[in-house]
Amino acid sequence: MTTIDKIETVIVDVPTIRGHVLSMATMKTQSAVLVRVRFSDGSEGIGEGTTIGGLSYCPESPESIQSVIDTYIAPALIGSDGDSVNGAIHLMDKLVQGNRIAKAAVEIALWDGLGKRLNVPVSQLFGGAVHSRLPVAWTLASGNSETDITEAQQVIESKRHNIFKLKIGKRPVREDVAHVAKIKQALGDAASIRVDVNQAWSLAEARWGLKGLQEVGCELVEQPVPARYRGAMAELTSGYEIAVMADETLNGPEDALAVAAGKSADVFAVKVAQSGGLRRASEVIAIGQAAGLGLYAGTMLETGLGTAAALQLFSTVEKLDWGTELFGPLLLNDEILSDSLRYRDFCVEIPSGPGIGVALDQDKVDFYRRGGKKSLKA
Ligand code: MUC
Ligand code: MG
Protein backbone atom coordinates (compact mmCIF):
# COMPACT_ATOMS: atom_id res chain seq x y z
CA MET A 1 0.00 0.00 0.00
CA THR A 2 1.23 3.51 -0.83
CA THR A 3 0.75 5.56 2.29
CA ILE A 4 0.74 9.28 2.98
CA ASP A 5 4.10 10.06 4.64
CA LYS A 6 4.14 13.82 5.00
CA ILE A 7 1.96 16.88 4.29
CA GLU A 8 3.72 20.25 4.06
CA THR A 9 2.15 23.70 3.64
CA VAL A 10 3.49 27.10 2.71
CA ILE A 11 1.82 30.48 2.15
CA VAL A 12 3.10 32.47 -0.82
CA ASP A 13 2.27 36.19 -1.15
CA VAL A 14 2.46 37.17 -4.82
CA PRO A 15 1.82 40.78 -5.94
CA THR A 16 -1.00 41.39 -8.46
CA ILE A 17 -0.42 43.21 -11.76
CA ARG A 18 -2.66 46.09 -10.57
CA GLY A 19 -5.02 46.81 -7.72
CA HIS A 20 -8.03 44.45 -8.06
CA VAL A 21 -10.98 46.44 -6.70
CA LEU A 22 -13.83 44.29 -5.39
CA SER A 23 -16.88 45.43 -3.39
CA MET A 24 -15.41 44.08 -0.15
CA ALA A 25 -11.64 44.49 -0.62
CA THR A 26 -8.92 45.83 -2.88
CA MET A 27 -6.29 43.21 -3.60
CA LYS A 28 -2.69 44.15 -4.24
CA THR A 29 -1.31 40.74 -3.34
CA GLN A 30 -2.73 37.24 -3.61
CA SER A 31 -1.92 34.83 -0.79
CA ALA A 32 -2.06 31.18 -1.78
CA VAL A 33 -1.64 28.16 0.48
CA LEU A 34 0.39 25.51 -1.34
CA VAL A 35 0.39 21.89 -0.18
CA ARG A 36 2.87 19.13 -0.90
CA VAL A 37 1.97 15.54 -0.02
CA ARG A 38 4.84 13.03 0.08
CA PHE A 39 3.97 9.34 -0.33
CA SER A 40 5.77 6.21 0.88
CA ASP A 41 6.86 5.18 -2.66
CA GLY A 42 8.68 8.50 -3.15
CA SER A 43 5.95 10.08 -5.28
CA GLU A 44 4.49 13.51 -4.52
CA GLY A 45 1.34 15.50 -5.14
CA ILE A 46 0.76 19.26 -5.01
CA GLY A 47 -2.37 21.24 -4.21
CA GLU A 48 -3.57 24.77 -3.50
CA GLY A 49 -6.16 26.39 -1.24
CA THR A 50 -6.75 30.06 -1.87
CA THR A 51 -9.26 32.68 -0.82
CA ILE A 52 -9.71 36.36 -1.66
CA GLY A 53 -9.05 39.50 0.38
CA GLY A 54 -8.06 37.98 3.74
CA LEU A 55 -11.28 37.22 5.63
CA SER A 56 -13.45 39.62 3.63
CA TYR A 57 -14.73 37.07 1.09
CA CYS A 58 -15.56 34.03 3.24
CA PRO A 59 -14.91 32.55 6.71
CA GLU A 60 -11.55 31.02 5.69
CA SER A 61 -8.27 32.97 5.50
CA PRO A 62 -4.84 31.91 4.20
CA GLU A 63 -3.73 31.57 7.81
CA SER A 64 -6.73 29.44 8.84
CA ILE A 65 -6.34 27.21 5.78
CA GLN A 66 -2.70 26.53 6.67
CA SER A 67 -3.42 26.01 10.34
CA VAL A 68 -6.36 23.64 9.74
CA ILE A 69 -4.21 21.50 7.44
CA ASP A 70 -1.16 21.49 9.73
CA THR A 71 -3.06 21.00 13.00
CA TYR A 72 -6.01 18.76 12.11
CA ILE A 73 -5.84 17.29 8.61
CA ALA A 74 -2.18 16.30 8.23
CA PRO A 75 -1.85 14.35 11.52
CA ALA A 76 -5.06 12.43 10.73
CA LEU A 77 -4.02 11.48 7.20
CA ILE A 78 -0.39 10.48 7.84
CA GLY A 79 -0.06 6.70 7.41
CA SER A 80 -3.37 6.29 5.58
CA ASP A 81 -3.83 4.86 2.06
CA GLY A 82 -2.51 7.41 -0.44
CA ASP A 83 -4.48 5.88 -3.30
CA SER A 84 -7.84 6.25 -1.58
CA VAL A 85 -8.78 9.87 -2.22
CA ASN A 86 -12.36 9.01 -1.26
CA GLY A 87 -11.12 7.61 2.06
CA ALA A 88 -9.26 10.85 2.75
CA ILE A 89 -12.31 12.95 1.83
CA HIS A 90 -14.43 10.88 4.22
CA LEU A 91 -11.90 11.25 7.05
CA MET A 92 -11.52 15.01 6.52
CA ASP A 93 -15.32 15.45 6.53
CA LYS A 94 -15.56 13.43 9.73
CA LEU A 95 -12.84 15.31 11.60
CA VAL A 96 -13.22 18.86 10.26
CA GLN A 97 -16.47 20.80 9.95
CA GLY A 98 -16.58 23.39 7.17
CA ASN A 99 -13.11 24.64 6.14
CA ARG A 100 -13.77 23.55 2.57
CA ILE A 101 -10.80 25.39 1.09
CA ALA A 102 -8.36 23.63 3.44
CA LYS A 103 -9.86 20.26 2.49
CA ALA A 104 -9.76 21.13 -1.21
CA ALA A 105 -6.05 21.98 -1.04
CA VAL A 106 -5.18 18.56 0.39
CA GLU A 107 -7.62 16.69 -1.86
CA ILE A 108 -6.11 18.27 -5.00
CA ALA A 109 -2.63 17.12 -3.90
CA LEU A 110 -3.97 13.58 -3.40
CA TRP A 111 -5.52 13.49 -6.89
CA ASP A 112 -2.28 14.88 -8.31
CA GLY A 113 -0.22 12.18 -6.59
CA LEU A 114 -2.60 9.42 -7.72
CA GLY A 115 -2.60 10.68 -11.31
CA LYS A 116 1.20 10.83 -11.33
CA ARG A 117 1.53 7.30 -9.95
CA LEU A 118 -0.90 6.00 -12.60
CA ASN A 119 0.70 8.24 -15.25
CA VAL A 120 -2.66 9.75 -16.26
CA PRO A 121 -4.06 13.29 -16.04
CA VAL A 122 -6.55 13.88 -13.22
CA SER A 123 -9.25 14.44 -15.89
CA GLN A 124 -8.98 10.71 -16.65
CA LEU A 125 -9.74 9.89 -13.01
CA PHE A 126 -13.00 11.84 -13.54
CA GLY A 127 -13.95 9.90 -16.67
CA GLY A 128 -11.80 11.65 -19.26
CA ALA A 129 -11.54 15.08 -20.85
CA VAL A 130 -13.99 16.17 -23.54
CA HIS A 131 -12.24 19.53 -24.09
CA SER A 132 -8.59 20.36 -24.78
CA ARG A 133 -9.21 24.08 -24.17
CA LEU A 134 -11.92 26.21 -22.60
CA PRO A 135 -13.10 29.81 -23.15
CA VAL A 136 -11.79 32.12 -20.43
CA ALA A 137 -13.18 35.44 -19.17
CA TRP A 138 -11.14 38.32 -17.73
CA THR A 139 -12.16 40.52 -14.80
CA LEU A 140 -12.09 44.30 -15.22
CA ALA A 141 -11.60 45.71 -11.72
CA SER A 142 -9.14 48.60 -11.84
CA GLY A 143 -11.72 50.86 -10.18
CA ASN A 144 -11.73 53.23 -13.19
CA SER A 145 -13.94 52.97 -16.31
CA GLU A 146 -11.37 54.39 -18.76
CA THR A 147 -8.59 52.12 -17.49
CA ASP A 148 -10.96 49.14 -17.74
CA ILE A 149 -11.84 50.03 -21.35
CA THR A 150 -8.18 50.31 -22.36
CA GLU A 151 -7.39 47.01 -20.62
CA ALA A 152 -10.32 45.28 -22.34
CA GLN A 153 -9.36 46.62 -25.76
CA GLN A 154 -5.80 45.35 -25.31
CA VAL A 155 -6.85 41.82 -24.40
CA ILE A 156 -9.44 41.66 -27.22
CA GLU A 157 -6.75 42.83 -29.65
CA SER A 158 -4.33 40.15 -28.46
CA LYS A 159 -7.15 37.54 -28.69
CA ARG A 160 -6.79 36.66 -25.02
CA HIS A 161 -10.32 37.40 -23.81
CA ASN A 162 -13.63 38.66 -25.18
CA ILE A 163 -15.76 37.83 -22.14
CA PHE A 164 -15.52 40.34 -19.29
CA LYS A 165 -16.68 40.28 -15.70
CA LEU A 166 -16.90 43.73 -14.13
CA LYS A 167 -16.55 44.00 -10.38
CA ILE A 168 -19.19 46.37 -9.04
CA GLY A 169 -21.07 46.99 -5.76
CA LYS A 170 -18.71 49.47 -4.14
CA ARG A 171 -20.31 52.61 -5.59
CA PRO A 172 -23.98 53.65 -5.58
CA VAL A 173 -26.09 51.46 -7.91
CA ARG A 174 -26.72 54.28 -10.40
CA GLU A 175 -22.97 54.93 -10.76
CA ASP A 176 -22.26 51.24 -11.18
CA VAL A 177 -24.85 50.93 -13.96
CA ALA A 178 -23.33 54.00 -15.69
CA HIS A 179 -19.87 52.37 -15.41
CA VAL A 180 -21.14 49.14 -17.00
CA ALA A 181 -22.97 51.10 -19.74
CA LYS A 182 -19.78 53.03 -20.60
CA ILE A 183 -17.76 49.83 -20.97
CA LYS A 184 -20.46 48.00 -22.95
CA GLN A 185 -20.80 50.99 -25.29
CA ALA A 186 -17.04 51.21 -25.86
CA LEU A 187 -16.62 47.48 -26.57
CA GLY A 188 -19.90 46.86 -28.43
CA ASP A 189 -20.68 43.39 -29.72
CA ALA A 190 -16.99 42.38 -29.58
CA ALA A 191 -17.47 41.52 -25.93
CA SER A 192 -19.79 39.73 -23.53
CA ILE A 193 -20.27 41.83 -20.38
CA ARG A 194 -21.19 40.35 -17.01
CA VAL A 195 -20.94 41.77 -13.48
CA ASP A 196 -20.14 40.46 -10.02
CA VAL A 197 -21.61 42.38 -7.06
CA ASN A 198 -20.04 40.13 -4.39
CA GLN A 199 -23.17 40.36 -2.14
CA ALA A 200 -23.07 44.17 -1.85
CA TRP A 201 -26.70 45.08 -2.65
CA SER A 202 -29.90 45.00 -0.63
CA LEU A 203 -32.92 43.54 -2.43
CA ALA A 204 -34.23 47.05 -3.15
CA GLU A 205 -30.88 48.13 -4.64
CA ALA A 206 -30.67 44.90 -6.60
CA ARG A 207 -34.07 45.52 -8.24
CA TRP A 208 -32.84 48.85 -9.60
CA GLY A 209 -29.49 47.32 -10.44
CA LEU A 210 -30.84 44.39 -12.44
CA LYS A 211 -33.32 46.59 -14.30
CA GLY A 212 -30.53 49.04 -15.25
CA LEU A 213 -27.99 46.34 -16.08
CA GLN A 214 -30.23 44.45 -18.48
CA GLU A 215 -31.19 47.71 -20.22
CA VAL A 216 -27.52 48.48 -20.97
CA GLY A 217 -26.82 45.01 -22.41
CA CYS A 218 -25.20 43.24 -19.46
CA GLU A 219 -25.83 39.49 -19.77
CA LEU A 220 -25.40 38.18 -16.25
CA VAL A 221 -25.23 39.33 -12.64
CA GLU A 222 -23.33 37.31 -10.05
CA GLN A 223 -24.28 37.19 -6.36
CA PRO A 224 -26.11 40.56 -6.24
CA VAL A 225 -27.33 40.11 -2.63
CA PRO A 226 -25.84 38.44 0.48
CA ALA A 227 -25.36 34.68 0.28
CA ARG A 228 -27.94 33.95 2.99
CA TYR A 229 -30.78 35.75 1.15
CA ARG A 230 -31.76 32.90 -1.14
CA GLY A 231 -35.39 34.10 -1.24
CA ALA A 232 -34.23 37.45 -2.59
CA MET A 233 -32.05 35.63 -5.14
CA ALA A 234 -35.12 33.66 -6.23
CA GLU A 235 -37.17 36.84 -6.61
CA LEU A 236 -34.44 38.42 -8.75
CA THR A 237 -34.01 35.25 -10.81
CA SER A 238 -37.69 35.11 -11.75
CA GLY A 239 -38.19 38.90 -11.95
CA TYR A 240 -35.71 39.84 -14.69
CA GLU A 241 -34.44 38.57 -18.04
CA ILE A 242 -30.76 39.03 -17.08
CA ALA A 243 -29.23 35.75 -15.84
CA VAL A 244 -28.56 35.53 -12.09
CA MET A 245 -25.53 33.51 -10.99
CA ALA A 246 -24.96 32.01 -7.53
CA ASP A 247 -21.43 32.27 -6.13
CA GLU A 248 -20.89 32.90 -2.40
CA THR A 249 -24.15 31.09 -1.58
CA LEU A 250 -22.82 27.89 -3.15
CA ASN A 251 -20.61 26.01 -0.68
CA GLY A 252 -20.81 22.40 -1.74
CA PRO A 253 -23.51 19.99 -2.92
CA GLU A 254 -26.00 20.64 -0.09
CA ASP A 255 -26.12 24.34 -0.99
CA ALA A 256 -26.34 23.45 -4.67
CA LEU A 257 -29.42 21.34 -3.95
CA ALA A 258 -31.05 24.13 -1.91
CA VAL A 259 -30.32 26.79 -4.55
CA ALA A 260 -31.65 24.54 -7.33
CA ALA A 261 -34.77 23.55 -5.37
CA GLY A 262 -35.49 27.17 -4.42
CA LYS A 263 -34.92 28.39 -8.00
CA SER A 264 -32.50 30.91 -6.48
CA ALA A 265 -30.25 31.19 -9.56
CA ASP A 266 -30.11 30.58 -13.30
CA VAL A 267 -26.41 29.69 -13.24
CA PHE A 268 -23.96 28.04 -10.82
CA ALA A 269 -20.47 29.56 -10.50
CA VAL A 270 -18.76 26.27 -9.62
CA LYS A 271 -15.59 26.82 -7.60
CA VAL A 272 -13.37 23.90 -6.63
CA ALA A 273 -12.13 25.57 -3.43
CA GLN A 274 -15.56 26.76 -2.28
CA SER A 275 -17.10 23.36 -3.05
CA GLY A 276 -14.51 21.56 -0.89
CA GLY A 277 -12.44 19.96 -3.65
CA LEU A 278 -12.69 18.35 -7.07
CA ARG A 279 -15.01 15.53 -5.93
CA ARG A 280 -17.48 17.91 -4.24
CA ALA A 281 -17.29 20.34 -7.17
CA SER A 282 -18.20 17.46 -9.50
CA GLU A 283 -21.26 16.86 -7.29
CA VAL A 284 -22.24 20.54 -7.50
CA ILE A 285 -21.93 20.26 -11.29
CA ALA A 286 -24.14 17.16 -11.34
CA ILE A 287 -26.85 18.91 -9.32
CA GLY A 288 -26.73 21.94 -11.62
CA GLN A 289 -27.01 19.67 -14.65
CA ALA A 290 -29.90 17.72 -13.16
CA ALA A 291 -31.75 20.97 -12.38
CA GLY A 292 -31.21 22.30 -15.92
CA LEU A 293 -29.15 25.26 -14.69
CA GLY A 294 -26.32 26.98 -16.55
CA LEU A 295 -22.75 26.20 -15.49
CA TYR A 296 -19.68 28.43 -15.18
CA ALA A 297 -16.22 27.52 -13.93
CA GLY A 298 -15.42 30.09 -11.23
CA THR A 299 -12.13 31.01 -9.58
CA MET A 300 -10.75 32.09 -6.22
CA LEU A 301 -7.95 33.76 -8.18
CA GLU A 302 -5.66 30.80 -7.62
CA THR A 303 -2.13 30.56 -8.96
CA GLY A 304 -1.45 28.29 -11.94
CA LEU A 305 -1.50 25.30 -9.60
CA GLY A 306 -5.10 25.61 -8.38
CA THR A 307 -6.14 26.79 -11.84
CA ALA A 308 -4.67 23.67 -13.47
CA ALA A 309 -6.52 21.47 -10.97
CA ALA A 310 -9.81 23.17 -11.84
CA LEU A 311 -9.05 22.79 -15.56
CA GLN A 312 -8.65 19.03 -15.08
CA LEU A 313 -12.20 18.77 -13.72
CA PHE A 314 -13.90 21.26 -16.04
CA SER A 315 -12.32 19.64 -19.09
CA THR A 316 -14.59 16.65 -18.34
CA VAL A 317 -17.82 18.71 -18.36
CA GLU A 318 -19.48 18.66 -21.74
CA LYS A 319 -21.56 21.82 -21.47
CA LEU A 320 -20.19 24.87 -19.69
CA ASP A 321 -22.85 27.31 -20.87
CA TRP A 322 -21.09 30.42 -19.53
CA GLY A 323 -17.45 29.31 -19.99
CA THR A 324 -14.78 29.84 -17.36
CA GLU A 325 -12.93 32.58 -15.51
CA LEU A 326 -9.86 30.43 -14.89
CA PHE A 327 -7.43 33.32 -15.43
CA GLY A 328 -5.89 33.48 -11.91
CA PRO A 329 -2.21 33.30 -12.93
CA LEU A 330 -2.69 36.23 -15.35
CA LEU A 331 -3.60 38.53 -12.44
CA LEU A 332 -0.29 37.75 -10.71
CA ASN A 333 2.85 39.69 -11.37
CA ASP A 334 4.98 36.55 -11.44
CA GLU A 335 4.67 32.88 -12.34
CA ILE A 336 5.25 30.22 -9.70
CA LEU A 337 4.92 27.26 -12.12
CA SER A 338 7.95 25.96 -14.00
CA ASP A 339 5.84 26.15 -17.21
CA SER A 340 3.00 28.66 -17.48
CA LEU A 341 -0.51 27.68 -18.49
CA ARG A 342 -1.20 28.73 -22.08
CA TYR A 343 -3.81 31.41 -22.84
CA ARG A 344 -4.56 32.10 -26.50
CA ASP A 345 -7.43 32.44 -28.98
CA PHE A 346 -9.76 33.47 -26.12
CA CYS A 347 -9.16 30.12 -24.42
CA VAL A 348 -6.98 28.44 -21.82
CA GLU A 349 -5.43 25.09 -22.75
CA ILE A 350 -5.85 22.07 -20.48
CA PRO A 351 -2.45 20.76 -19.29
CA SER A 352 -2.02 17.22 -20.58
CA GLY A 353 0.70 15.75 -18.34
CA PRO A 354 0.10 13.28 -15.50
CA GLY A 355 -1.70 14.45 -12.36
CA ILE A 356 -2.85 18.05 -12.60
CA GLY A 357 -0.21 18.49 -15.30
CA VAL A 358 1.90 21.27 -13.81
CA ALA A 359 5.00 21.63 -11.59
CA LEU A 360 6.10 24.37 -9.19
CA ASP A 361 9.18 26.53 -9.74
CA GLN A 362 10.74 25.94 -6.31
CA ASP A 363 12.93 29.06 -6.48
CA LYS A 364 9.84 31.19 -7.00
CA VAL A 365 8.00 29.45 -4.19
CA ASP A 366 10.96 30.11 -1.88
CA PHE A 367 11.11 33.73 -3.01
CA TYR A 368 7.42 34.45 -2.32
CA ARG A 369 7.04 32.23 0.73
CA ARG A 370 5.78 34.12 3.79
CA GLY A 371 8.23 34.68 6.64
CA GLY A 372 11.37 33.44 4.98
CA LYS A 373 12.02 34.89 1.57
CA LYS A 374 15.14 33.68 -0.13
CA SER A 375 16.60 35.45 -3.13
CA LEU A 376 16.04 33.94 -6.56
CA LYS A 377 19.02 32.30 -8.17
CA ALA A 378 20.32 34.17 -11.21
C1 MUC B 1 -15.56 36.09 -7.29
O1 MUC B 1 -16.29 36.54 -6.45
O2 MUC B 1 -16.06 35.49 -8.22
C2 MUC B 1 -13.47 35.81 -9.50
C3 MUC B 1 -12.95 36.61 -10.45
C4 MUC B 1 -12.46 37.75 -9.82
O3 MUC B 1 -11.92 38.72 -10.32
O4 MUC B 1 -12.70 37.67 -8.50
C5 MUC B 1 -13.20 36.39 -8.23
C6 MUC B 1 -14.08 36.25 -7.10
MG1 MG C 1 -18.09 35.95 -7.56
Image (cartoon, rainbow, N blue to C red):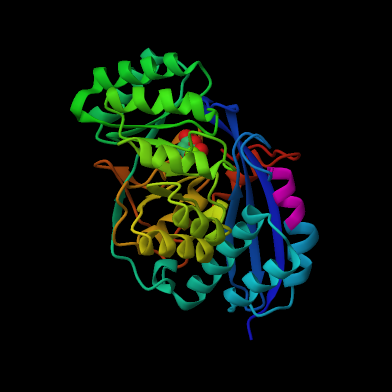
Q: Main secondary structure of the magenta part?
A: helix
* In the foreground, 319 or 156: 319
* In the foreground, 324 or 333: 324
**Is residue 229 in sight in this rendering?**
yes
Q: Where is residue 366 in the image (x, y as percent from the top left)?
A: 65, 44
Q: With respect to residue 377, does 123 lie above or below? A: below
Q: Position of residue 95 (x, y in %)?
A: 75, 67
The quadrant where residue 292 appears: bottom left
Q: Where is residue 200 in the image (x, y as percent from the top left)?
A: 55, 28
Determine whether, in the image, residue 63 is placed left or right of residue 329: right
Q: With respect to residue 361, does 21 lie above or below? A: above
For the point 53% across and 63% down, which residue is it?
280
In magenta, the rendered stretch is 61-68
For the point 69% across and 67% down, which residue is it?
92
Q: Residue 53 in magenta?
A: no
Determine whether, in the image, residue 51 is placed left or right of residue 301: right
Q: With respect to residue 211, does 304 lie above or below? A: below
